[in-house]
């Protein structure tokens, strides 16, 4: 099976968790026993430098153009990418859309349908583009791959895609995550965390992520003067409101190195995750892998992903008022349950699911 994976859309640092999602799948694909598959990856410029581990599991080719601009990427998919499909049995478009007159057969990954749930977070042009291209891309795909049952149901209902053509490929976490950790004493010194407990939230500051909810919780319920709320991740549409917070117990660190993020999770009293929309929510699994008790909202896929290994509550200040006390009472139980839950979401498991998608796509073609 000769597979080409289109990752021209995957501009390093610009596409959120979907970047890690696809990279981890390809790493997991290489771990499959009896699967002799070394795909070709058409990567956005800079992706290989950001993920040099890809070179060991795929033949990576980068174009001579930048694909950050949508118009340039679309043109590149119709020309440069097309030339790389010679001798290819299957193309995998990982960014939710396929080019016009795409090489057949192809697999399409749809990460979520957030633009339908929160259209106000997208420009009019981008809404129109996604609303026109995603349905057609999904209908012409041999198989649509999605990260969770929630997104699977959303795609089937939104685009009337046959259920046997929509398959779940969950996020996967590498075992090495637990060994790439900055020590706690270094983190406390580097980020002026004091000596008290911290709450960790790694998420871009988009409105649906719920940062302002956490700020309200700090004002009204979590008033321990020694407690710190640590916010990491890129700047989103709600960045100004978050940055305006004048509570010295709230630290907005922005993007931090992976080892620091892992260390902050490992030392956290809890990872608090009040998002109202997720296609999967990879930080939930990362936190459980690293031993951080998880408190999250009850929307979209989160109850399914966390199961009974964390505390799942509706996004309501009264419902969350006592969660830190519950974390303290149940800490040992939550840590053990979380680590056991995380073992279901490895990069190898994600790669196995992707291999099944490729086999199904060829079977249906």
Image (cartoon, rainbow, N blue to C red):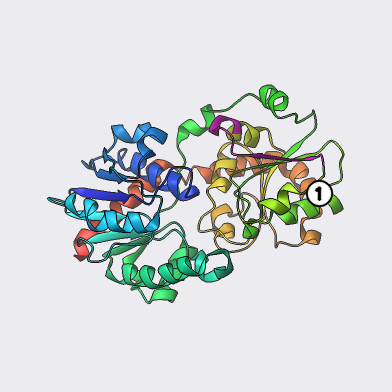
Apparent side of residue 30 relative to residue 338 in the rendered image (left or right):
left
Q: Is residue 162 visible?
A: yes
Which residue: 69% across, 52% down? 240
| Whole-percent x, y for residue 124 in the image | 50, 70
Which residue: 74% across, 52% down? 214
The magenta span reads: 248-260
| Whole-percent x, y for residue 10 in the image | 40, 48
Disc 1: CA contacts within 10 A as few (<14), some (14-19) or many (>=20): many
Count of numbered marks: 1
Q: Quadrant of residue 301?
A: bottom right
Apparent side of residue 95 relative to residue 191 in the rendered image (left or right):
left
> Is residue 213 within the magenta segment?
no
Secondary structure of residue under mark 1: helix
| Whole-percent x, y for residue 321 in the image | 81, 54
Indicate whether 38 appears above or below 113: above
Which residue: 52% across, 27% down? 179
Apparent side of residue 361 relative to residue 176 in the rendered image (left or right):
left
Which residue: 39% across, 57% down? 70
Indicate whether 46 appears above or below 195: below
Question: Dot 1 corresponds to which residue?
Answer: 218
Q: Residue furthest left?
A: 87
Q: Is residue 164 visible?
A: no
Q: Which of 32 and 316 is in front in this view?
A: 316
Q: In which quarter of the image is residue 196?
A: top right
Rendered-image quadrant of the C terminus = bottom left
| Whole-percent x, y for residue 17 in the image | 49, 48
> Is residue 251 within the magenta segment?
yes
């Amino acid at each position: 099976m000769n597979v080409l994976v289109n990752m021209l859309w995957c501009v390093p640092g610009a596409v959120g968790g979907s970047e890690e999602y696809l990279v981890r799948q390809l790493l997991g694909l290489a771990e499959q026993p009896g699967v002799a598959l070394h795909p070709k990856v058409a990567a956005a410029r800079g992706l290989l430098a950001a993920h040099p581990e890809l070179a060991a599991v795929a033949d990576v080719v980068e174009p001579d153009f930048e694909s950050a601009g949508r118009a340039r990427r679309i043109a590149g998919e119709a020309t440069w990418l097309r030339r790389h499909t010679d001798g290819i049995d299957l193309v995998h478009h990982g960014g939710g859309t396929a080019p016009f007159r795409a090489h057949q057969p192809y697999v399409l990954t749809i990460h979520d349908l957030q633009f339908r749930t929160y259209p106000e977070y997208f420009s009019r042009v981008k809404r129109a583009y996604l609303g026109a291209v995603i349905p057609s891309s999904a209908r012409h795909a041999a198989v649509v791959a999605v990260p969770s049952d929630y997104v699977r149901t959303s795609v089937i209902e939104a685009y009337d895609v046959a259920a046997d053509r929509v398959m779940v490929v969950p996020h996967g976490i590498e075992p090495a995550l637990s060994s790439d950790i900055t020590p706690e004493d270094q983190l406390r010194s580097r980020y002026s965390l004091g000596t008290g407990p911290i709450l960790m939230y790694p998420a871009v500051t988009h409105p649906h992520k719920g940062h302002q909810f956490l700020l309200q919780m700090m004002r009204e319920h979590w008033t321990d003067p020694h407690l710190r709320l640590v916010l990491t991740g890129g700047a989103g549409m709600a960045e100004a409101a978050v940055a305006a917070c004048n509570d010295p117990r709230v630290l907005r660190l922005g993007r931090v190195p992976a080892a620091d993020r892992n260390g902050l999770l490992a030392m956290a009293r809890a990872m608090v995750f009040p998002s109202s929309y997720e296609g999967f929510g990879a930080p939930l699994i990362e936190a459980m892998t690293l031993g951080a008790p998880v408190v999250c909202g009850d929307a979209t896929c989160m109850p399914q992903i966390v199961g009974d290994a964390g505390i799942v509550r509706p996004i309501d200040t009264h419902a969350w008022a006592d969660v830190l006390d519950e974390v303290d009472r149940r800490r040992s139980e939550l840590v053990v349950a979380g680590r056991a839950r995380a073992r279901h979401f490895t990069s190898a498991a994600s790669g196995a699911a992707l291999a099944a998608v490729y086999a199904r796509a060829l079977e249906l073609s």
